[in-house]
Each structure stands twice: as C-alpha cells, then as structure tokens.
Image: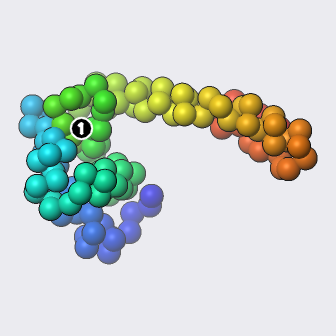
C-alpha cells in the first residue's frame, strides 16, 4: 500500500503508535482488544492493515505465530529476516493448490492464469 498521508494520519497512525517497539514489550490480542475497544476480528483486521501499510519508517510489525508473546514493532534486521522467511513459507503453503486450480481452469477453457509461485502461465 503506497503512502497516503491523510489515511495514515487519520486512520492508522494512532493504532501504529499503540504497538510497542521491541520483542520484550510485545502486546497481546487481549491487551489490544481492551486498548482499542474492538472485537478480536476488528483487531486482526487492524493488524493486517498496519502490516501492509508502508508509512516510510524503518519498523516492521511482527505478527508471528512463533511469537506467542504478542505483537511488536522492530527494526532489528535478524527479527525482520526471520519474519520475512515465515511470511514467505506461509504464502507458499497458501498458494500451493493454485497450480492444480490453474490447470483445471485452463483445461476447462476458462482463462489463462499466472502461477504466482513459479511464474508459469497456464
């Protein structure tokens, strides 16, 4: 998501600032639900929006399944690389069925679909 200062300043920045910096300061879903006065579903959506939005700073929101302590921002290169690897593995797992789906849709004469994992056109 490209930087849009109005969207950032009015909608996301206050929530971004509520995410602590550093793994040792991580905040849990429960704490965010209370702090933001939102449902768990709304908190998940906000975390997703915050993760996808590039506000131009050097921090990444860590939303790792491996970090059971909660959510935090970091500019630590090692932590960012580990999270990147985790995200890539999740993405590959989620997109794994696409190859077969693409083949079936192509064979049915529906459309040619680009395979995200392999860059193949079916």
Q: Position of residue 109 (x, y in %)?
A: 90, 47
Q: Residue 70 vs residue 80: left or right?
A: left
Residue nearer the viewer, 94 or 4: 94
Residue 119 visible in the displayed image? no
Is residue 106 visible in the rendered image? The answer is yes
Q: Tell me: 25 left or right of 93.
A: left
The residue carrying mark 1 is: 75
Residue found 9% across the figure and 31% down from its top: 24
Q: Is residue 18 above or below residue 63?
A: below
Looking at this view, is 44 or 91 the one in front?
Answer: 44
Crowd around label 1: few <14 · some 14–19 · many ≥20 (10 Å): some
Q: Indicate the quadrant where residue 104 lies.
A: top right
- Quadrant including the N terminus: bottom left
User: Can you give x and y, in whole percent of width and height, for residue 45 in the image?
Assistant: 34, 55
Q: Residue at x 83, y 50 (%)?
A: 111
Q: How many marks?
A: 1
Instruction: Specify how the rendered protein is coloured.
Output: rainbow
Q: As drawn, is 68 to the left or to the right of 97?
A: left
Q: Where residue 71 sits: x, y (%)? A: 21, 40
- Whether residue 54 is situated above or below residue 93 in the rendered picture: below
Counting from the top left corner in percent of width and height, residue 56 is at 32, 55
Residue under the point 20% across and 60% down: 38
Residue that appears at 55% across and 29% down? 92
Task: Determine whether 118 is above or below 31 in the image.
Answer: above
Q: Is residue 85 left or right of residue 40?
A: right
Provide the secondary structure element on which disc 1 rests.
loop
Q: Quadrant of the C terminus?
A: top right
């Amino acid at each position: 998501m490209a930087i849009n200062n109005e969207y950032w300043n009015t909608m996301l920045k206050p929530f971004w600032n509520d995410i602590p910096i550093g793994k040792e300061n991580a905040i849990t879903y429960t704490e965010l639900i209370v702090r933001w006065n939102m449902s768990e579903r709304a908190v998940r959506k906000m975390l997703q929006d915050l993760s996808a939005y590039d506000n131009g700073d050097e921090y990444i929101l860590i939303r790792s399944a491996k970090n059971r302590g909660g959510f935090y921002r970091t500019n630590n290169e090692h932590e960012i690389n580990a999270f990147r690897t985790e995200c890539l593995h999740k993405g590959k797992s989620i997109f794994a069925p696409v190859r077969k789906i693409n083949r079936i849709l192509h064979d049915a004469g529906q459309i040619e679909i680009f395979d995200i994992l392999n860059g193949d056109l079916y």
